[in-house]
Image (cartoon, coloured by chain):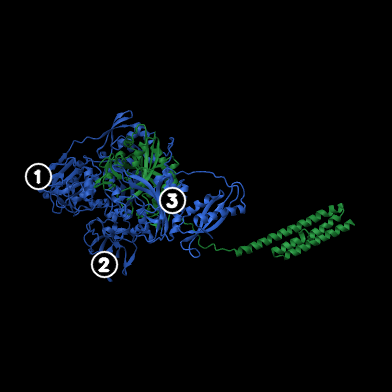
Amino acid sequence: MNILASYNWIKEYLKTEATAEEFSREMSLKSMSVESIEYLKDRFENMVIGVVKELKVHPDADRLKVAMTDIGGKEVQIVCGGQNLCSGMKVVVALPGAKVIWHGEGEYVELKETKVRGVESFGMICAPSELGLEKAYCSAGGIWDLSELTSAPAGTSFVEAMDMDDIIFDIEVTSNRVDSMSIIGLAREGGVVAEGEFKFIEPESIKEGSGKDLKVQVDEQDLCPCYMAVVIDGIKVGPSPMWLQNKLLLSGHRPINNIVDITNFVLHEYGQPLHAFDYDKLEGQTIVVRTARAGEVIETLDEKTYELSKNQLVIADALKPVAVAGVMGGEQAGTTEATTTIVFEAATFNPVSIRRTSRALNLFSDSQLLFEKGLSVQLPEIALARAVELTLEIAGGYVASTVYDIRKVEYVPLQFPWNCQKSRNVIGVDLSDEDMIKILEKLGFVLDGSGGQYQVTVPFWRDHDIENEIDFTEEIARIFGYHNIPITLPNQEPPTVYADQALLWEDRTKMLFCSHGYTEFCGYSFVSAHDLERYDLDPSDAVELYNPLSSDLTHMRTSLAPSVLKDIEMNQGQVQSGQIFELQRVYLKKEGDLPKERTRLVFGEFGVKDVNQAFLQQKGMLLLWAKNVGLEIRLERLEDDVYWHPTRSASIMYKANRVGIIGQVATQYQNAFGIERPVMMVDLDFEAVVADMNKKMRYEPIPEFPAIIRDIAVEVDAKLEFSQIKSALLNLDSIIRSIDLKDVYQGEGVETGKKSLTLSIILRSDSQTLSSEVADSVIEKIATVAIGKLSAKMR
Amino acid sequence: MSIEKNKDMRQKLEQLKSDFTSAIEQISSEEALEALRVEYLGRRGKLGELLSGLKDLSAEDKKEIGPFANQIKQELEAGFARKHAELMQELAGEKAQSEWIDITAPGIEPVNGNLHLTTQAIQEVVSIFNQLGFIRVRHPEIDWDYYAFESLNMPKDHAARDEWETFFIADGNKVMEGEKGKVVLTPHTSNGQVREIEKGYLPIRMMNINKTYRRQSDVTHVPMFHQFEGLLIDKGVTIAQLKGVFDFFVKRFFGPEREVRLRPHHFRFTEPSFELDISCNLCGGSAKIAGKKCRMCKQGWLELGGAGMVHPNVLHAGGLDPKEYNGFAFGWGVERTLMMKSGMNIDDIRILYKNDLRFLKQF
């Protein structure tokens, strides 16, 4: 969470000579990260107060006006579209060189002297949004009317006129340090990190009054451990003074009216959300903190209506909810111009309850943000006093009731033991006890003890943050400065661990496929029920998400195939063919236990033109991979698997088990996924074989005698498998070293139903150089068997 | 007499040399040169013929004329070699002209495969941490609430355990629950911390890299992404050592000129907790480029990820005595690390997992 913090405001509580840069650096290193620094003098450079002297209609555009404007010592001509512009109005003029947000949208743009529809325009008369202050109050018509700035003559710089010579920090506050989501909190941290003195003067406690009684009742003390309220009568609601509005604007709040502005002011300054009710609109002048009743609805200040449910905490009057507790006030009992009596509420709510209510209603606010991080029950009292002090000063009136204060239990500060040596050990720097104690004390901790062992009392603003002795180590280390801790590598002996071999094999597999022209897919682990069904997988067999983000990501995939097919379909319009692989996990349901996560490998070619060729290529890749990972696999023809083409697929066998399938995706599934051209694919259970993967290194002596290579052409039955030919011929003689298929031909010159094969045969003897006569005789033997056993015709 | 003979021989040799010299000038082909060589230097060539006359000379004459004849022979041979080299060079030039190729024609690239960007980043990260003895492990992506939250010092009502932040697994129309709580898609790789400690092997230098899941999807968020999680558990582990490891990684992954810093941060399972920043490479850490605010970084620094000293409650959960052992953990998004290194500006991060080949084939 971030806060916009004015340095001037911080300095009301922090006496420091540190420049904004120094403050920001020290804060970032030791406390909260300052994400940006904005110098308002720079941001509003070349912006001055102007007074409109004379107004003419633009000769060529009805909706534009030409304003002769006094910018101090001279009058300039400015073209302006603002409909509320009138003669005598005091306005902000952005002169050439100023940076404005064009029409309040997008980035800052530097203004130049220009012509608007042919008329010279020296700058721009601005709307608040064009200055980046879109939350400023502005009457209809768009131009920011600053006529009430009587003390600033034309030509005064905007920054000076508005008392905005300030520096704004955008600070990221970590979720555990909600105390720093406030000016006071930042000043307090600043006092420790940035060479300064934090001075906090508590507001005077409220002088109780009488006359307007209120009935306050807290039904849910677990959800509301502290509820305070006070009535102020005789107030006048109206716009806040300029200083207050400006402070809010620079803090990112929208000025509304003095009462609402005071609650936002205190929220920003103290970090305690407050709420103001119109006393007269509270039925029975009663406040009840209770959970909502079934069917209750509330219209909140954002003018939306919410239906509440039973576990949600509300602030109600005698009849109905008047606020969603800690989240947003109701429209009905809010303060308006007509309000004369208000009830200020300052409370602490259960952070979890606030968060759940806010998420369930999808309703968010500055208050909710702070409450859900956990605020101290000690904070409402001083924040309420501050609000009353400001109200009496700004809106008049008097305290008309006692201060109601309902608490679950008496506040007891947290205490933890702390040992100096333990902190020193973890930080790794030889800090003295005194230095560490000094740091803790500066941060507001109170120490009791001696000799390196202490009992530490936690200040109330750290109530939800400090939970353990180790937290003190963090406080000391960060204030000492993490950047001051030296850099050393661990000098302990590293463990002797044998790396997870499965991960290494996955890596090698990926590298192999990549180096052979395959592109790696990595898709979402979740798919839709529809994707599973398209591949005839039953979604009820898949691990299902209880709270999916959308209906297309509902089930954990049990197979990579559907995702890969879907991705092929998505690609085919742009990339007609390609080779892809995916090596990722699938998730298999296990009754009453965590799902089994298994790695699978899918690879293949899509957009296939020559199916036979594609099969051989993927088979070749499969075998190459198997060789590289040291697996001996074999293929067995597969005929009865609906997912695969009945005559173009095979089981991949490892030992006695089928571990995968290679083949053409069955037409039915190709169609189901809308894929136009055949897909030749391997789907393999990587997990089933990974344990046996092994990079075998084996040396085979280089042959001593040369080989003879002979090619022969045989014509055989078209359906005769090469493996049959090979097994029939390979063992005919010990000098036949290998038989390879060089070419297959069907067509002219070959009988229908037959094919002509060119076999490449390598002959080699281990004991002598072969003579061509010996080679001839072996080839002769091969031919005889081919003709006899394989009904081949020699060509 | 012998003087005469010698003189005659000498003249003949000189004549031969001058004939050869003028003849060789005229030669323009390899064949003609060879013919000339045969004519003069061949076995039955002119020089040989002339020198055969030497045998008739007296020993004394031989001694006188011999060295001169030898010198002439060497000169002829040198002349021939020179011409031969000249000719070869000329011929090579001509031959080369006839063998001209167009070197500007487009190259034929081998079919190139592509590793997914995440795979590439993981490999690089792992290789760096390997050098410090961190070994990659893999813990479940779908895990018990206990490992994902409870054992990491995150109380039951912690926001991350809410249904709008974390994916839960269904059991019918309920959230699936078992012996160690609800079943979740791990929102971070930190579930590996207590699981690794429970293995019972000490010390620990773990690098757990896995898919992680969060309920968010927009131009800067993907519901599935990758994280890596380093965990070091040993005796006497210090913040200084965490800084050392981080510095080691950053200098090797991002470059030796990059600076690192730790900033205070907050995580439930570490104490102290840090945000790890590296200096911005665009503005060189100055936060300004040509007088304007650097758009890449925050005041000269880029947030890389979170880290911290393992919380005693986490050590306890794993069965370790925090008095004896301590450690540090760090972890952040692989995708983010990759983007920061490459400086790539991908306007919608979700393209990473769409498997669009036009995207994947760029890397």
The blue chain is A
Please tell me the numbered disc located at residue A275: none
In this rendered view, identify the residue nearer to me: B199 or A228. B199
The green chain is B
Instruction: Give the amino acid type for the residue marked by disc 2 in the picture.
Output: Lys
In this rendered view, identify the residue nearer to me: A615 or A379. A615
Q: Nearer the observer, disc 1 or disc 3?
A: 3
Indicate the position of residue A624 as horizontal and vertical percent values: 47, 50
Upstream in sequence: badge 3 or badge 2:
2
Circle 2 SS class: strand
Q: Are marks 1 and 3 on the same chain?
A: yes
Instruction: Give the amino acid type for the residue marked by disc 3 in the picture.
Output: Leu
Upstream in sequence: badge 1 or badge 2:
2
Circle 3 SS class: strand
Whole-angstrom CA distance, mark 3 to mark 2, is: 85 Å
**Chain ID, mark 3:** A
Please tell me the numbered disc located at residue A65: 2
Indicate the position of residue A523 as horizontal and vertical percent values: 36, 52
Q: Nearer the observer, disc 3 or disc 2?
A: 3
Please tell me the numbered disc located at residue A635: 3
Q: Residues within 10 Å of mark 1 (few under 14, many from 20)?
A: few
Residue position for label 1: A211
